[in-house]
Amino acid sequence: MHGTLIGVNESTVAGIGRLARFFGFNDVMGRLYGTLLLNPEPLSLDDLADQLQISKGSVSMNMRDLERWGMAKEVWMRGERKKYYQAESDMWQVIRSVINSRERREVQMALQVLGESITKLQSAQAELTPEERELAAYYLERIADLQGFFQFAQMALETVLGKADSIDFEAVTKIEIG
Amino acid sequence: MHGTLIGVNESTVAGIGRLARFFGFNDVMGRLYGTLLLNPEPLSLDDLADQLQISKGSVSMNMRDLERWGMAKEVWMRGERKKYYQAESDMWQVIRSVINSRERREVQMALQVLGESITKLQSAQAELTPEERELAAYYLERIADLQGFFQFAQMALETVLGKADSIDFEAVTKIEIG
DNA sequence: CCCTGCGTTCAAAACGTTTTGAATGTTAGG
DNA sequence: CCTAACATTCAAAACGTTTTGAACGCAGGG
């Protein structure tokens, strides 16, 4: 195992932990990822538990999640019985994987709920009193706003997913619709 | 107070609560926002506590947060001593406000940590052994990747902040109302 | 087969966040 | 000023999440 260098490791790893939290993962996942990212050599569960001072059980569970998110992969070291892990260091790959399995689903769910609400309101139209009809019209307005927003988000996500290898600033400026 | 219409209110409000959670707010904030959004009239703290079946204390605290995030505003009803609230219904306004006070800060912090690490590594160069120097070079590579990513994120955010007015929801929204 | 050295699981403990309601502030009207 | 009608605060309780470590499972070597 390599040593760390003048505290750079620590602060970067802590920062990544913080970010992980921000993005709705947990701290440990972020720190594990950061630790792997800053290590030229793959690390074993024990190495990780050791370096981050957390229990092996936690490392095991969190590494499974990291694998699921496509943020780390197992590496086989010949002659070794231990599992070794490496960070997926292509940031775009990581982003795409997370968008694909989480953000996307979330946006789709939102759109589905909104769509269902619109359908309900529209098909109930006939049976409503004039007063209720007014309220329904108001709901439809608000819900349409939300729908517009999520449709926009959906397009943005699909755009990111579509750009296979390199996204540059161009891509973002072109997301604009109007 | 208006009644709700065939469960549309409930599912939409619940959905917004869920999303709030996803975006790192809490559930109650989302539900409060959703409730306000679907009410043509401003609501008082008591109305909200009543409608969501939560304590007034909680409503009070969460409404303060909503105001801070620019997601709701107070409305003065003449002849009334109660506080009334309305949702900020311009989605772009909401997004911009949240990006501006949260995401942006987060990205800046990340960039600062990374920048400091790079500086540390570079200025320590001279005192390192050849071996350490190799490790330092590796760190610099990884950290530069991260930096690239966050610089991209920063540009994207600034773009949204700058262009927000020109992005047109209606263009994306193709819903028949009524 | 039976060790040994791993990884995984899971219930309990630690820890963190949210909710509540009683106490406390605040304001306007009388 | 006082009071009534509200809003706000905050400590305790409820609830949720994360961490731990002991128990278990599994594979490979002897």
Image (cartoon, coloured by chain):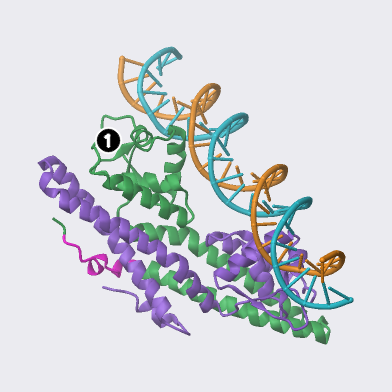
Chain colours: A purple, B green, C orange, D cyan
> Is residue B78 found left or right of A12 in the rendered image?
left
Relative height, residue A19 to residue A86 (above, below)? above
Residue A67 rendering spot, x and y as whole percentages = 59, 71
Residue D22 rendering spot, x and y as whole percentages = 78, 50
Query: Residue B169 lies in magenta, yes or no?
Result: yes
Residue A144 rendering spot, x and y as whole percentages = 24, 58
Relative height, residue B11 to residue B118 (above, below)? above
Query: Residue A74 lies in magenta, yes or no?
Result: no
Residue labelled with disc 1: B77
> Is residue A178 found left or right of A68 in the rendered image?
left
At x 60% / y 79%, what residue is drawn? A89
- Which image quadrant for residue A133? top left
Instruction: Describe the element under mark 1 as helix, strand or loop.
Output: loop
Relative height, residue B172 to residue B94 (above, below)? below
Residue A125 rendering spot, x and y as whole percentages = 13, 49
**Looking at the image, can residue B141 be seen?**
yes
Relative height, residue D13 to residue A105 (above, below)? above
At x 36% / y 64%, what residue is drawn? A108
Residue count near mark 1 (Cα–Cα under 10 Å), binned few <14, some 14–19, many ≥20: few
Tell me the quarter of the image containing the N terminus of chain A: bottom right
**Looking at the image, can residue A16 be seen?**
no
Nearest the eye: B13 or B75: B13
At x 56% / y 80%, what residue is drawn? A90
Tag 1 subunit? B
Nearest the eye: B148 or A124: A124
Of the residues shown, which amino acid type is indicated by label 1? Answer: Met
Q: Which residues are magenta?
A: B164-176
Tell me the quarter of the image containing the C terminus of chain A: bottom left
Q: How many marks?
A: 1
